[in-house]
Image (cartoon, rainbow, N blue to C red):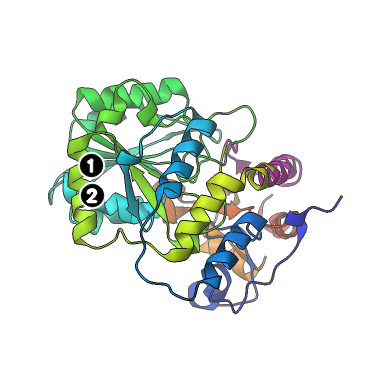
Amino acid sequence: MQSRFDAIIDRKGSGCFKYDALPMLFGRGDLLSLWVADMDFAVSDEIQSALAERLKHPVFGYNLRMDDFSAAIESWQQKRFSWKISKDWLVAVPGIVPGISLAVLTLTNPGDGILIQTPVYRPFYDAVSDHERTLLCSPLINQDGHYTIDWDDFEAKLRQAKLFILCNPHNPVGRVWSRDELTMMGSLCRKHKVTIFSDEIHADLVYPGFKHIPIAALEDFGNFTITGVSPAKSFNIAGLATAVLVISNPQLYARVSGLNNKMHLYMGNSFGIRALIAAYRDSEAWLEEMLAYINGTRSLITDFVASELPGVILSPIESTYLAWLDFRAWGLDEVELPKTLVNQALLALDPGNKFGTEGNGFMRLNFGCPRSLVTEALERIKAISTRIYT
């Protein structure tokens, strides 16, 4: 049966970063675009209706978030993750990445150490270096594609840190951190008096057999944790620039919200507010249908790589719509690999070194799109692999 998610929607010419930036970033515009992490799926009918309804009102002035905004977030966190939060803990921000910078600026000083687990989402690096803090990297251990934490190294780096930026679930390696892993991370941060910023933007995108756990919901970790949440990834509304920070500690809350207010980042946009409410309150059925669809694509990728792409290793995809592919056996360096995929396979993927030096020889493939496009991409990789890998 055809799924609504099989529909191919032409996004070119819409001012879309994923497609319209191809000539600027990849040198040509005729590529199958599976790089930056947004989906090619139409948003839910409920979100579309909510935005159409808001458009009927002809004034788009400054916004006030009414009770339905916080109620939608509170209800979603309770229902999906059994995490009871309060409206008094919410700091409205334009996105989780700006929220990370707010935490860096309010909780650390120039030169202070900030810990990240690499390879990881590029803005984590930027939030540290752009604000002249000291970057501390604890590389994850790669065991045949499955990533775990080097606890000795993690604790050694924590001793030098004031802030730990956690990716939960992890982008790009796809890990859903277990309760034991989160408890160990939180306990070590408490021991060394390190504040946690937990980026949980992919929390809704977890596959059967795995469970997302907000680290702030464990033990007393909420006392020293800032959690970033947003429907941006799971409901494909990143362009509406709407997220919140969840901060239960009043002192942490006052510091972060204070700078947020001084920078006037709190006002939000009229459509993002309504979209968040429609996503969390009215679009759960759409999300479940979408998750089932991309889970099928996940299985397709897993089987194809195992059977048709010898020499390529796929990290187990526990979460996200992002496949982390190890091409090191091809023997191409970090410049040649993406260039080969662009020029020979006509594919735009995210190069692994974008996520740190541990990503050299890897590529990240976004499969949040119609399955036919993913199949085409895999076949193109197979076609050139027969010439490169022997």
Is 301 magenta? The answer is yes
Q: Is residue 170 visible?
A: yes
The residue at the point 63 percent across, 53 percent down is 368
Q: Nearer the viewer, residue 63 or 110?
A: 63
Give the left or right position of residue 22, taking residue 165 as reference.
right
Q: Is residue 117 left or right of residue 144?
A: left
Residue 257 horizontal/vertical position (percent): 23, 49
Specify the principal SS of the magenta part.
Answer: helix
Residue sitting at 18 percent across and 29 percent down? Answer: 193
- Tell whether 158 sits left or right of 38: left
Q: Answer yes or no: is residue 120 visible.
A: no
Contact? badges 2 and 1 (CB < 8 Å): yes
Question: Going 30% across and 26% down the picture, which residue do you hit?
Answer: 221
Q: Which residue is mark 1?
A: 253
Left or right of 223 in this view: 356: right
* Image quadrant where residue 268 sits: bottom left
For mark 2, give the secondary structure: helix
Residue 151 drawn above or below residue 358: above
- CA neighbours of label 1 inside 10 A, class few (<14), some (14 to 19), many (20+): some
* Amino acid under disc 2: Ser
On the image, numbered disc 2 is attached to which residue? 257
**On the image, which quarter does residue 301 sit in?**
top right
How many residues crowd around disc 2 within 10 Å: few (fewer than 14), some, or many (20 or more)?
Answer: many
Residue 8, label in figure: none
- Percent coordinates x, y for residue 153 in the rendering: 30, 29
Judging depth in this view, the residue of 365 and 185 nearest the camera is: 185
Q: Amino acid at mark 1?
A: Tyr
The correct choice, above or below, for 217 with respect to 131 in the image is above
Q: Nearer the viewer, residue 157 or 175?
A: 175
Q: Write the residue at 30% across / 50% down.
A: 100
Where are the magenta residues, as a range?
A: 289-318
Q: Nearer the viewer, residue 255 or 101?
A: 255
